[in-house]
Image: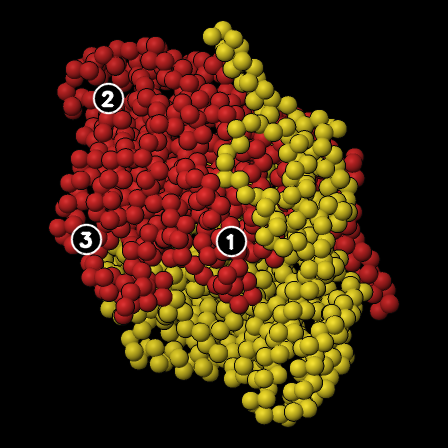
Chain colours: A red, B yellow
Amino acid sequence: MANDNRDAQADNDTLLKIFTIPEAPDSTLSQIETQISKNLNGFLSHHIVATDKPLSEIEQDFLSSALPERPAFVSDHTRELLDKLIAQSVHTSAPSFIGHMTSALPYFLLPLSKLMVGLNQNLVKIETSKAFTPMERQVLGMMHRMVYGQDDNFYQFWMHDADSSLGAFCSGGTVANITALWVARNNLLAAKPGFKGVSEEGLLKGMKAYGYEELAILVSERGHYSLKKAANILGIGHDSIIGIATDSQHRMDCQLLRQKCAELSAQNIKIMAIVGIAGTTETGSLDPLTEMAQIAHQYQAHFHVDAAWGGATLLSETYRPLLKGIERADSVTIDAHKQMYVPMGAGLVVFRNPKAVAAIEHHAEYILRKGSKDLGSHTLEGSRPGMAMLLYASLHIISRPGYELLINQSIEKARYFASLIEQHQDFQLVSKPELCLLTYRFVPAQVQQYLQSCSLGKALQINEVLDQLTIVMQKLQREAGKSFVSRTRIPEQGQDSQAISVFRVVLANPLTSEDILQQVLAEQQKIANEQQTLLAQLQSLIED
Amino acid sequence: MANDNRDAQADNDTLLKIFTIPEAPDSTLSQIETQISKNLNGFLSHHIVATDKPLSEIEQDFLSSALPERPAFVSDHTRELLDKLIAQSVHTSAPSFIGHMTSALPYFLLPLSKLMVGLNQNLVKIETSKAFTPMERQVLGMMHRMVYGQDDNFYQFWMHDADSSLGAFCSGGTVANITALWVARNNLLAAKPGFKGVSEEGLLKGMKAYGYEELAILVSERGHYSLKKAANILGIGHDSIIGIATDSQHRMDCQLLRQKCAELSAQNIKIMAIVGIAGTTETGSLDPLTEMAQIAHQYQAHFHVDAAWGGATLLSETYRPLLKGIERADSVTIDAHKQMYVPMGAGLVVFRNPKAVAAIEHHAEYILRKGSKDLGSHTLEGSRPGMAMLLYASLHIISRPGYELLINQSIEKARYFASLIEQHQDFQLVSKPELCLLTYRFVPAQVQQYLQSCSLGKALQINEVLDQLTIVMQKLQREAGKSFVSRTRIPEQGQDSQAISVFRVVLANPLTSEDILQQVLAEQQKIANEQQTLLAQLQSLIED
């Protein structure tokens, strides 16, 4: 018994050490940390295995559902993480990883992230965040000003006002979009005599109280899938998301939008919101926001702009005009972890009217008491980390002109890549870059020529083979591990054409050079030339 | 013009440096990082100003809404962060900060967090996370097994299954609770002949299709405010959250629950979900889960358990029985950033039935294609960081027996503090610790005695003064900066008594010693003795 007690005490002491004794400077973990600090890209390039391993094989290292019954030494476990997890992760910051919305990160964000984790603030309430709350309110104020450009008096009055909020910081664009449409729904079905509001009484009674039979959310067919998710969660249903066809540049066709609005109104379907996209996920296209704002105003619909990707473009004086009309939006989503170069997990939504968030206000006894400045009274999430600090620091250290350089560079790089593709006889540019995204595919010169005048039936057959070619090329390039582009399916040109598979490229990484872009194309050409069967099929189709 | 170009190039080069050149070892930021690595608590104790500064003063440092037009040097900005932000933040990991659900963190999580940020994976899809996806699936499997204890075959079959998911990792308990109730709602109003399901057609048509007039979610009056938020977002409305009174130990009164269920059913109100709480936020109380599971089964209601706080208790063989019945829940919320000692931003929900998440499945063209193992098809959030790695590492390094020690220690510490309070003649223990939470207040011995036999009217008067005393004491203690307890309002004993203000204490920090607890109480005694006016009021009330 005495022995047992001594053992227990010893176990206990060992355990407390992990909370009190830092990793030794020569431990595996400390060494890794030093490597990361000195040369992150070098560390990642060295430790991440470049070539692709099938997922089924990787899964073999993650099969045990049993809870470990023996503690692992930190160094042993770190080595295991290196071998099994890090080695098979994705080098998202590699300059040749241009398939998704990832990038290299500014170095100063690494130690700052560690500081943030060490501080472990919880932004839900001031009692666990204190200065982090006014700091986040300032960041929201800055983002609000970037979008809406109100004057100093406006921000002086509203930024730190206890009963309102200029927006909500959150984990990402999806939560931001849900929050915006949640506010829109609750303001549409607000309390009035005889009805306590949708937040209290729910959607069924809300619709009855206002005499609506259905709600609709109108968005271009290129809208992000999170909008459907929002409609689902909010109880409105996917069907209420009315996709409006786009023009040849993947932008909302406002004539069709007007038609649809008139149609819906005639059917007593209330237009709850119109959503504009400022930087579609697939092609980076920008909806005509000013015209959409007018239509939304006409139908008294909430006008939301999903600028998760494109919002940062507002920091560029050169390209800011592309987003003209965004200042008329009722709410705007922006992802700081995209073109603002902050690590994953930082999104936000801003509202033109600081009182808009009252529609989703909530309180509790132990926190978020009425009149408190706790940010948690107006957020979808509860406990939240101090990520806003990373955006705060980036805005100060990079500054607006620095962001402008980054944004401009990305757009110009996309134009350069587009010109490379257009000059190449065997590639076809499918969507031109408005921002730094573009799509293209491999189509042998002869086939391109043939497609221009062949029958629709033949074109369908050819595109089917080209789709297979795109899919296999993308897969082989990814597996080879030198570079990565993604793929998607979009209509070739505007609303009436058929959907085709394309390579999708996002050029936001400041370290992606023109050389790398040339290499990506050269590698694809090489992979394509090796697809003898598919190329022969194409040949026979055009000779047929 | 040539000069302009040269300047632009120079600006550009400077900017690229932040992405390519690490902080110098002697830079301010690197020095801070070293201090954090060597002695986090020392760093925080040194840099965080202990005494309270009014929020209005702190806000003076966060007034500018203008976007910075000049880049700041990293070192200058770091110093600014230290002076303005860090200095006025909260030392949430201080052993004497026992008012909220925060704690010291294991040291190894600091460098691992930095590694996670540097890797910048995005868990929404395999293309940006690769091994992180199977790793997160394993973590969900482990948490599922902790709750439901299925056999190896079960996990072998389901853990990496493309069409299902054992749960969802997310930013915190609120999103987890919303996800669980979203699944419950969508499964209740699932597709059937003539109806495409609530996800497609929305709540209005769903209710009609199933012939329900209202939905209800039953939860004890001590439930977390996030459940109301969930009802609001999901379109069901706050009113549908039916709060059931609790017994004298703040646990759901199952007799009342049965009564209410029968009543609602008679009114054609469908019971969508019954929610059990395993560790209430205010008192750490545990609902009688087995009996609740039976009732939920009887009414074919989804049984959700909010174990955001208490879930980790399952790792303790000694205290696991307290949560008996949790294995019958359809879904369970657990926060890894609470009693699993992971930094802020890590919550999860597990589902007994791996097919349950099909109710919220979504796809897109460029990711989350059908048949892919992308985790993003079953989560509320979209892009998400690799936080699961921190839980994965903690589970291996601390291991189940290590967690058991931590959990047991916390509970025993709470019992020790409860005994201190009970022994002290001037303090009153209001809620006994079931887990490591308790509530109490300062009530001079004479007043305690008087309250036992006085009239209800007199008790009300006295409690009003005691509430003032509690509120002012908590505020003064917080402002003095040596220690922190929180406060809330709860009924003194069970359902019929009036609500009183109490100190609330959470004893999860392994570094909180018995000494510190004695000091907290001594400090409070001292503060109380200084409240001459209130004490005199009490005296006159009992002499009256």
Neighbour tally class for label 2: few under 14, some 14-19, many 20 plus, Cα within 10 Å:
many
Q: Secondary structure at mark 1?
A: helix
Nearest the viewer among A498 and A115 is A115
Q: Secondary structure at mark 3?
A: strand
Give the chain of mark 1. Answer: A
Task: Give the x, y percent position of residue A304.
Answer: 33, 43
Q: Which residue is mark 1?
A: A375
Nearest the viewer among A206 and B65 is B65
Q: Quick one: quadrant of the C terminus of chain A? A: top left
Give the chain of mark 2. Answer: A
Q: Which residue is mark 3?
A: A269
Q: CA distance from mark 3 to mark 1?
A: 35 Å
Residue for point 39% across, 66% down: B238
Tell me which label, 1 or 2, sits earlier in the chain.
1
Q: Amino acid at mark 1?
A: Leu
Residue for point 24% across, 68% down: B211
Q: Quadrant of residue A530?
A: top left
Q: CA distance from mark 3 to mark 2?
A: 42 Å
Task: Give the x, y percent position of residue A69.
Answer: 68, 55
Q: Which residue is mark 2?
A: A462
